[in-house]
Image (tube, helix red, strand yellow):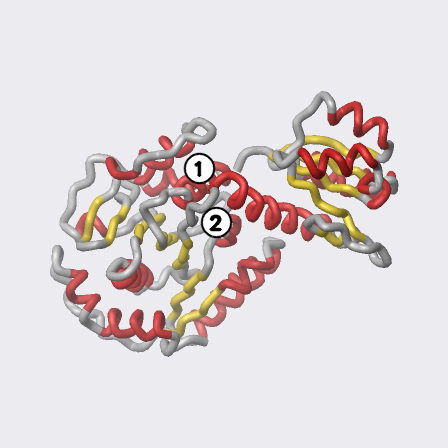
Amino acid sequence: MSTLSVAVCDANQSYGESIGTYLFIEQGEKFSGGFFSALEAFREQFSKQKFEIVLLGKAFIQEAWIQEEIGQNENILWIHLWEEGEEPEALPVIEKYQPASGVIRKIYEFYEAYHKEKFVGAGKRAQIIGWYSPEQNIWQTPLALTMATILAETERTLYVNLKECSGLTYWLQEDYEQDLLDVMYFSKNLQTGEKMNLGRFTYQLGKLSYLPPVQDGILLSELKESDYLSFLEMLEQQEEYDVIVLDIGTMFSGFFSVLEKCRTIYLPQEQNVFSHGIYKDFQKMAGRSNINSVEEKIVKLSLPEWNRQKITPGCVMQQWMWGGQGDYVRELLAGTGRRD
């Protein structure tokens, strides 16, 4: 995601300095702009600089010229920095006195909703479903790919494998001229407002579209958080798809930010004490990420004891679709599958 230009306007200077330090210094790779405690200072800077988001304390909101700008300037997301005892304004509201990380999450939440309404228009953004196993469970990809294939029967679905070693080349008996890194490279270099045509990269598996897996998996660890987020932003804006299934391998830069973009995150695991211990470590790490919505989206799956049947290259989808994995996924989608 590109840097957001933000103005924080509040008469309480100590508050402004505190939130400003966090936004523009500690999180400087995400936010630019400044804090203003004086109306005239903000007015002067406002005439010179283009802000995407303006957070306003009560004293600033009451100013006539700001009220006029709120009514006329639809290119700015105006947010009320609300504190207890105040009457909320007819604007998005963020509680003023809370941890700075909470303020940032709300900024992103409001900006995402505003961005969709303002710039995407009536176009519906694709929903993202994530699959990730802290224990690197062998059934993750079979289940994720089977889910994507089943969903593709009724919804326009794209499957994306983010594993270092996917196994798809062997399982599907397909040779790929380009790989996922090529797609990510092109999405990273898109101009503002430019849409990417995925058709030249996608492969078909029946009704399911999928992107070719990465060939040199170690390169995934060299990408930046912004690379992954711009890639997902590009995928969400693809009007050809309703659902995107992400099959994620090990952690990478911006891992939890990627999970935050998912509507649901499936975590498959074996039913034993070793898997339980691994999941507990992951749970603690997710808590430390300060992205609360990730934990709320996780669906922990207790897998049955499937026999590791012989795999026939080129025929694996038929085996998974009409075997125990297919039955399991259908029950999961119907809301009757086994969960923890």
**Residue 25 visible here:** no
In the figure, residue 56 lies in which quadrant?
Answer: top right
Q: Position of residue 197 (x, y in %)?
A: 31, 35
Residue drawn at (53%, 67%), measured in percent from left and top? Answer: 280
- Judge by depth and name the residue closer to the eye, 243 or 148: 243
Image position of 21 (left or right of 11):
left
State the residue position of label 2.
258
Q: Secondary structure at mark 2?
A: helix
Residue 221 picture location, percent across and down: 42, 41
Write down the residue under mark 1.
223
Furthest residue toward top: 48
Label 2 vs label 1: CA separation? 13 Å
| 207 sits to left or right of 235 | left
Left or right of 249, for residue 25: right
Q: Compared to 163, does 192 lie above or below? A: above
Circle 1: element type = loop
The spot of residue 295 in percent (x, y) is 54, 63
Q: Amino acid at mark 2?
A: Val
Relative vertical location of residue 52 with respect to residue 331 in this rendering, above or below: above
Quarter of the image for residue 328 reads bottom left
Disc tally is 2
Mark closer to the observer (2, 1): 2
Residue at figure coordinates x 32%, y 60% from the top left? 144
Q: Is residue 95 visible?
A: yes
Neighbor class of circle 2 (other Cα within 10 Å; few <14, some 14-19, many 20+) is some
What residue appears at the point 17 percent right and 61 percent down from the top-left corner? 316
